[in-house]
Image (cartoon, grey):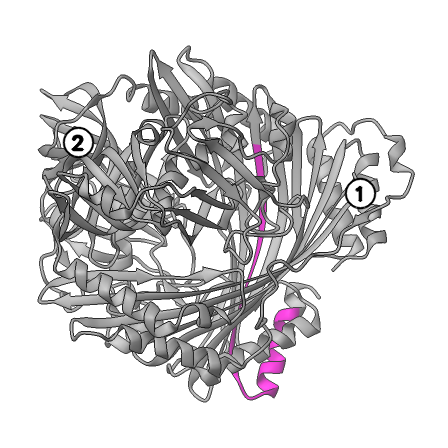
Amino acid sequence: MTLEEAKRYLLRRAKELGLEAEVLFQEERELSLRARQGALEEIKEARQGGIGLRVVAQGRVGYAYTEELSPEALEWALAEARDNALLADKEGLIPPGRALGSHDLLGEGLSAPLETKKQGALALEKALWEDPRTRSVLMGGYMEKEVRVALASTLGAEGDFRTGLAGMGGSLVMGEGASLKQGWDFQLAKEFHALDPGRTALEIRERTARLLNAKPLPTGRYRAYLEPKAMAGLLWVLARSLSGKSALEGKSRLLNRIGERIASEWVTLVDDPTLEKGLLSRPFDAEGTPARRTVVVEKGIFKTFLHNAETARALGQENTGHAFRTYRGVLDVAPTNLYLEPVGNLRLEKGVLITEFMGLHAGANPVSLDFSLQALGLWVEEGEARHAVENFAVSGNLLELLQAIEAVGDELDWEVMGAALGSPMVAVAELSFAGA
Amino acid sequence: MLNPDLVALVLRQALKGGADFAEIYAERSRRRRMTVRSGKLEEAISGLDYGAGIRLFFGLEVVYAYTNQLTQEGLLEALETLLRAKGALGRVDERGAGGLDFRKTAPQGLHTPKVPFSEKDKRFRLERLLEAEAGARIAPEVQRVEASLQEWEQEVLIANSEGTWAEEKRVRTRLHVLAVAQDGTEVQTGYAAPGKSVGLELFELYPPQEVGAKAARQALTNLRAKPAPAGTMPVVVGNAFGGVLFHEALGHLLETTSVAKKASVLADRLGEEVASPAVTYVDDGTLPHAWGSTEVDDEGRPTERTVLIEKGILKSYMVDRLGHLLTGYPMTGSGRRQDYTFAPTSRMRNTFIAPGDKEVEELIAGVEFGLYAKEMGGGQVKPGSGEYNFAVQEGYIIRKGRIEEPVRGAMLVGKGPETIRKVVAVAKDWENAPGMCGSLSGMVPVEVGQPHVLVSEIVVGGRA
C-alpha cells in the first residue's frame, strides 16, 4: 500500500469500528555525504515513512504506529491503539478538524545536482585541513533532509506540507604543542545555495583554534558572557519547563507563575513558527492548529505556556498551537523557532566568555532547572579575549541565571537542537565556576 | 523476513555494480511503552518498525541506503539509488554472475526471554506499573511519580556477499521510575531504571515497588542535600552505573570510529601503559541477558568478550568492519547501529572495570575530604581531546574517611587519559547497569559497570 492508501484505509476502518481517529503520516528523504581525506567516505541516501495513529475510544486516548503498510500491520496498529485507549485512564479528544491546505515551504531549496553537493562536501573537508594545527578531521560533509507531513482525521482535518533543511559542517581536532582541542559546528539553511563550505570550515577552525593552550580557571564567581551556541543549549533545557504538558505533569517550576517576573527586563522570549526563513517553520501543528507567533516571556514577565489542545483544555488556557508529534510518538508540546530577542546593550568587559556547554542532557535537570555543566571558554579582560580556559564546570539554576541577565547582544544566531533556538550573546552578572 | 533468493539477487546486483562487498540488514521491531502518573495509565503507544538498510563498500568508500519497502522492487530501487549516488559505475565483477552460498548459523538462544513480548495481557503490565508508583510514595514530599515500561522485540537479518546469514530475535524490557519531591519552593528528582535483555521476568529480578522506592529515596536525599562544593578533590565513584565515567572517559576513545582517523588521544597506543595498573577494562557482548548483549553484532559477526586494557596496558580496540579495513586490527564483533536507518560503526556493548581486591570501606577510609559519587547521571566526551563530563545524581561528602551529608548538582569534569591514570584503588563489588549510548550510528543499549573506584583527583563542579 502507499501511504495515501494506508491513510484512507485507516480512517475508513476507524469509522467502521466507531472510533475517532487522527492519522499523522510522515515521509522523509535523507542524503548525507561524508568526506575523508579528499574522497567521499560515506554516502547515505534513503527514504523512510510511517503512520502514527491517535484514537479516542469511550472518551479515552491511545496510540500506535507502523512502518509496515500491509493490511495486517495496519489492523494490528488499529487494534493496539484501541486497546491502549481502553486501558488508559486519561480523557482525550481529537479536536474538530478542517481543511488545512497543501503547503510547500521548501520549493527548489534542495534541487542542486548531486555532483554539486558532493563538491561542497569535499570542499568543506579540504578547507578543514587548511590550518597547520589541524591534526585530524573526524567528520566533514553535507546533509539534507526533506520531509512531507500530512494530517487527516475522522473529524475532518485534512492537510499537508513539505519542508526541508540543508546543512554543512564537521568536527576536527586541532593541536599546538601538547594542547589538543576538538571542535565542531554545523550550518543549516533552507537552501543548498545559502551554504558556504569555505566560510563554515573557517569558522570551525577559528572557533577551535581560539581554545588551544588553555589555562586552568581558578574556582570562583565571575561574570559570564554566553555565546549564542551556549545560550541556545540553555533555552533548550528551559523549553521543557515552558511546555504545558510538563506543567500538567508537575515537572515545571513555572506552574502558577503566569504574570510573574521570572527573568530580567532584558529577556523577551518568542516562539514563531511563521518566520519566513525560520528553520523549523510550519503552517500548522501536529493537531492541525494553524501556526502563529507566541510571546512567551515579555521583558522578564512570564506570559504563557506553550500548549496543544489537550494541555490548554486541562489548564484552562488558550491553545498556542504547539502540538508536537512524530509518527513514532505520543502527543507532546514543543517550540518551533524559539528565540531570545536581541537588545544591543552588551559590551565585553571582564569575565569568562563561555563558547559551549557540554553534557546538557546529563548536567541540567529540566525539572529543578539546576545545572552543573562542563564548559569551554575564554578569559576576557578590558573587552578582549586574553587566553582560553579549560577543565571547569559552571553551576547554578536556570531561573536565577535568567534573573541575572544584565545585557543582551544585537545579533541573533540559530542552532537546531530539537527546535530551532535563537539567541544573541548574553551577559550574566555572576555565575559559579569550579576549576583548579 | 526476506527469502534467501531475493537477498542473493540484491547482493549479486550490488557486486555487478562494482561493489567489493555488499550487506543487507533487515529489521522488524515491535515496541510498546506504557506510562503511569498519579495512579492512572496516561499514555500507551505500540509500534511496528520495519525496514532494511543496504551497505556497499567500494574500497574504503561506503554507501548506505534504507527503505521501508522490503519487496524486490523496493530493495532494487534502493540499490539503484546507491549505485547512482556512487557515480561512474565501477567494473562489473565476475562474482556477479554466480549464486551465493549463505552460511546460516542457528541462534543459540543465549538471551531468550522466559516471558516473551506476546505473553501476559496489558493489564498485568499496568498492575506492575501501579506497584512501582505506589512503591515510590514513601513520604509526603514525594508529590509526583511517573512509572513507565518500555518493551521491545527486534528481529534482525544480516546477510552479506561473503556468505554471512545471521538472524536473531532480541527482546529487551526496562522499567523507568521518576520521582519528584517537593518541599516549599524546592523541587528535586530521583530516578531508577533497571533493564535487561529479558521479557516480563524483569519484574521478578527487580520488584517494581523496590524500584519505585529507590527513585523516591534519591529524590528525598536530593531535597535535603546542599549544593556540592566546587574544586579539585578525590572522588569515590559508586559501582554499577558509576562505570559511565569510564564509558565516557575511556571507552569512546577505544572505538575504531575515532581511532582510525587518529581522532582519539588513545590511537596508536597498543601495548602501552595508558591507565593505572589497578585498571582492567573489558567490553563483553556475551554476558547472558545483559542489556547490551546480542548473539551477533549488526554486521552479522558473533559478539565476543574483548579485553581492552589489562592491568593498565592497552590490549585491544573495538573494531567493526570499516575500522578493520582502515586499521588492520581484527574485528571484535563490535559493529552496532540503532536500527536500519543507520550504517553500523564500532560501538561499546557491556563495558566495565574488572573487580579489584579492596573492600569499599577501605576506599572511603582513605579520603580526608572528597566526594562520594554514589549514583551517576549521564555524560559526554570529545575523543579528540579526551575532555569529558558527567553528572552525579546522588552524592555525599566524605570527611575524615566517613560518608557524611548529601550534596547535589555535582558535575565531574576532566580529561579521560589523565583520570584513568589517577585510579588508585578498585574494590571487589563489581556490578553492571543499563544505559543508552548515543554516537554516529544512533542510540544503542549498553551496560556500564565497575566496582567502587577511588580516583585521587577530579574537578568537581558545584557552587563556588
Amino acid on which disc 2 is placed: Gly
Q: Is residue B410 left or right of residue B441?
A: left
Image quadrant in which you'd find residue A5? bottom right
Please tell me if label 2 and label 1 are on a single chain.
no
Label 2 crowd (10 A; few <14 / some 14-19 / many >=20): many
Label placed on residue B163 = 1
Instruction: Name the residue rendered at 32%, 53% in the picture.
Output: A272
Chain letter for the residue marked with disc 1 in the picture: B
Q: Is residue B274 left or right of residue A244?
A: right
Q: Secondary structure at mark 1?
A: loop
Label placed on residue A401 = none
Magenta-tinted stretch: A6-33
> On screen, A84 above or below B185?
below
Amino acid on which disc 1 is placed: Gly
Residue A19, magenta (yes or no):
yes
Q: Secondary structure at mark 2?
A: loop
A320 or B133, which lies in front?
A: B133
Q: Position of residue A296 (x, y in %)?
A: 22, 57
A402 or B353, which lies in front?
A: B353
Label placed on residue A435 = 2
Image quadrant in which you'd find residue B237? top left
Instruction: Name the residue rendered at 18%, 43% in the picture.
Output: B365
